[in-house]
Image (cartoon, helix red, strand yellow):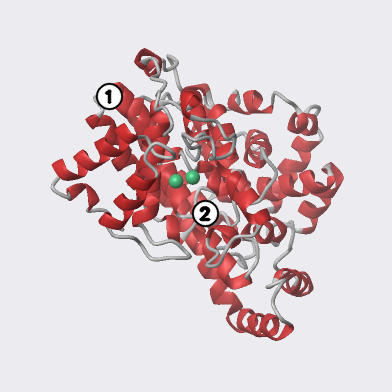
Amino acid sequence: MIAETAQYSDPSKVQDIPGKVYLSELMGALSYALDLTEGLPPGHCLRACWIGTQIAIELCLDDEALSDTFFTILLKDAGCSSNAARIYELYDNDDLSVKADFYTVNNQSLVQVTKFVWSHLAPHAPIREKLSRLVHLAVNGNELQDEVVSARCQRGAAIAKRMGFNDRVAEAINGLNEHWNGNGRPNRLSGSVIPLQSRIALLAQVTEIFYSAGGPAQALKEVYQRSGTWFDPRLVTALSRAAGKPGFWSTLKSTNLEKTVMSLEPASHAMEVDDQQIDIIAEAFAEVIDSKSPFTSGHSDRVAIFADAIAAELGFSPARRRWLRRIALLHDIGKLGVSNAILDKPGKLTDEEWTSIRRHPVYSRSILERISIFASLAPVAGAHHERLDGRGYPDGISADQISIETRVITTADVFDALTADRPYRKAMSLEQAMEILEKDRGTAIDGDCLDALKRAIENSGGALLNSDH
Ligand SMILES: [Fe+2]
Ligand SMILES: [Fe+2]
């Protein structure tokens, strides 16, 4: 039996929240998680934000429009996790590389699209299956692309609204994939009917992707080629002017990029966030995380409910419970960087796939470390798969290094994993789940946390389990 010497954190620390928290800082840091989901290089959203705001400045937009541009770009990929499972299903391939590579394809070139589809379709399947998938995509391509784009745009807009952004930002996220010539998706909007912020965001996105892949000349070449088809020519001219100014390209490589981009938020529209808004943003982000896979639908929300119930039984203060709830909501944020080909795989995982899974708490930790108000959550989120006996991951730390907060999250996480459907098995009953947790008492699961969970379920008369399992 492992000694259960929980390291109780100083509760005063959990209230150690910096005086002022700005929405821009929070969204800037969370945008790194969205880059992961799209398989794009870290910092893509921030660089696109720099490019887009420079275009907006060239256009002499007022502060309100500049602020809308700023947040539209930072949040443009908020809905991207919602089509990951579908892309994996259609391509039978790693959704992250399919998405990342598709960004460099001009979807108005049949040759480019065909080459892309053939090279990314079911790479390990027999040729007959690959052909049948190709026929399916060729026959239903239009509807399928509309479905995938629409899921992403609508979800992104809904998440922006949930976070408290205005209708203009939500509309602009919804219109991100519309093209100037009316051949975009999903609504085939054209010209100035497309919200201005959508047009700027798309131009900034493509510029950044080709800049990251091949440098400034490559970026401008691609943009000029798509002017009048994908892009509003007036915006391309504005970009061209901005790109000729000193510092435009070098800022993209700067280690100070995040600070520079944050300073572009118009002071008159800088939004401070309070505790309640931080909770709402964590809840909205939990939705982004859980949308990644059908098997994790509602997981973060339920872990938050179970963790809070355990914390209440253990006598945590309200401030500490609030802090813990945020960790529970965001503990799996690193899963956004794991391919659905692994997350949704019905069979046994290979060693390589396991290595990828084991990376998700590390990603969680590094994303949360970027955000001052979430930095204290980072070590707990990073340790939620550790075990008291030292056989967990990613660091293999043992009981004396595992805090009580981590133990609460781990207990809630494992309980939800057991009682929800998985790709490789159906959900377990409460009795079966408890039997397994009991076997792990003292080796993987903290006994006090397990007892607290049992009491909480009993005291709630089962209501605690009335979630969408
Ligand atoms: Fe996890
Ligand atoms: Fe989890």
Q: Which residue is mark 1?
A: 316
User: Residue 440: x, y in percent?
Assistant: 40, 44
Farthest residue in the front direction?
A: 1
- The circle drawn on residue 236 is none
Number of disc labels:
2
Q: Quadrant of residue 148?
A: bottom right
Please give the name of the residue rendered at 47% of the width and 28% of the height, measured from the top-left corner. Answer: 399
Q: Amino acid at mark 1?
A: Phe
Please give the name of the residue rendered at 75% of the width and 27% of the height, measured from the top-left corner. Answer: 254
Above or below, 273 relative to 229: above
Question: Please, what secondary structure does the residue beneath circle 2 have?
Answer: helix
Q: Which residue is mark 2?
A: 81
Q: Quadrant of the N terminus?
A: top left
User: Residue 434: x, y in percent?
Assistant: 30, 50
User: Residue 352: x, y in percent?
Assistant: 68, 54
Q: Please state which of residues 343 and 246 is positioned toward the viewer in this rendering.
A: 343
Tell which tag, 2 or 1, sits nearer the viewer. 1
| Residue behind label 2 places its C-beta within 8 angstroms of ligand 2 | no
Please give the name of the residue rendered at 37% of the width and 54% of the height, measured from the top-left corner. Answer: 418
Q: Please state which of residues 187 and 437 is positioned toward the viewer in this rendering.
A: 437
Label 2 crowding class (10 Å Cα cut-off): few <14, some 14-19, many 20+?
many
Q: Amino acid at mark 2?
A: Ser
Disc 2 + disc 1, Cβ < 8 Å: no
Q: Is residue 199 something that shows in the picture?
A: no
Q: Is residue 441 something that shows in the picture?
A: yes
Disc 2 and disc 1: Cα gap in Å?
Answer: 33 Å
Above or below, 165 relative to 148: above
